Image: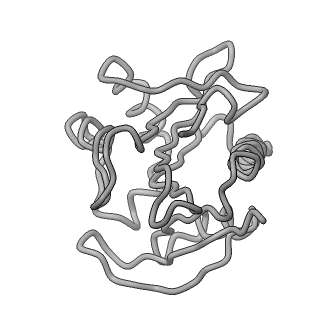
Amino acid sequence: MINIERLSGKYRVRKLDAQDIEAVRHICLSNPLFYEYTQARPGYEDIQHDMTALPDGKGPEDKYYVGFFDERGMIAVMDLIDGYPDEQTAFIGFFMMDKDYQGKGTGTAIISEVCAYLKEAGFAAVRLCINKGNPQSTHFWTRNGFQIQREYVREDGTVYLAQRQLS
């Protein structure tokens, strides 16, 4: 079980719910480049679906759809799955920073804190998918220690499976 309060020492982290959809949507709309490389859309219903979507074999207790907050409000959103695809791996299904916080090292700091906590919690690796062709996402994740493992086609487009070893 992931203790979300320990995902960051700098930012307040909490699970998000339907009352947070507009704030999540604001962050999504501030990142139009992301949506050029995916079929996903930042609509109200899409975000509501993402808040509960799970991979096969996982239950609601494994899902952590969280926001990172500073004194001004939500600055980032993350969808984190505990123990997927195996018990030693955490999966980031989505991570997005508010555009106003990008380019300042904030996203890298959050990912560093999350990975440090996950390592301490006993995870060996973190996985995620990067939309193929998205230069901003590819640069961010590879700069943060994620190595592209392979490329594959999903119903929503072609992605790179990337992983960062923690141990």
Q: Position of residue 157 (x, y in %)?
A: 32, 74
Q: Position of residue 166 (x, y in %)?
A: 75, 63
In the figure, 12 relative to 142: above or below?
A: above
Q: Give the left or right position of residue 52, taking residue 102 as reference.
A: left
**Foreground of the two, 10 or 143:** 10
Q: Give the left or right position of residue 15, taking residue 11 as reference.
A: left
Q: Looking at the image, which residue is at 67% across and 36% down? A: 7
Q: Looking at the image, which residue is at 64% across and 34% down? A: 100
In the figure, 9 relative to 38: above or below?
A: above
Q: How is the image coloured?
A: one colour
Q: Position of residue 129 (x, y in %)?
A: 48, 68
**Foreground of the two, 82 or 158:** 82
**Foreground of the two, 140 or 166:** 166
Which quadrant would the C terminus be assigned to in this image?
bottom right
Residue at the top extreme of this rendering: 71
In the figure, 138 relative to 50: above or below?
A: below
Q: Looking at the image, which residue is at 67% across and 77% down? A: 147
Exactly how many numbered labels are in the figure? 0
- Quarter-wise, where is residue 3 in the image? top right
Q: Looking at the image, which residue is at 72% across and 32% down? A: 8
Q: Give the left or right position of residue 70, taking residue 29 as reference.
A: right
Q: Position of residue 83 (x, y in %)?
A: 49, 56
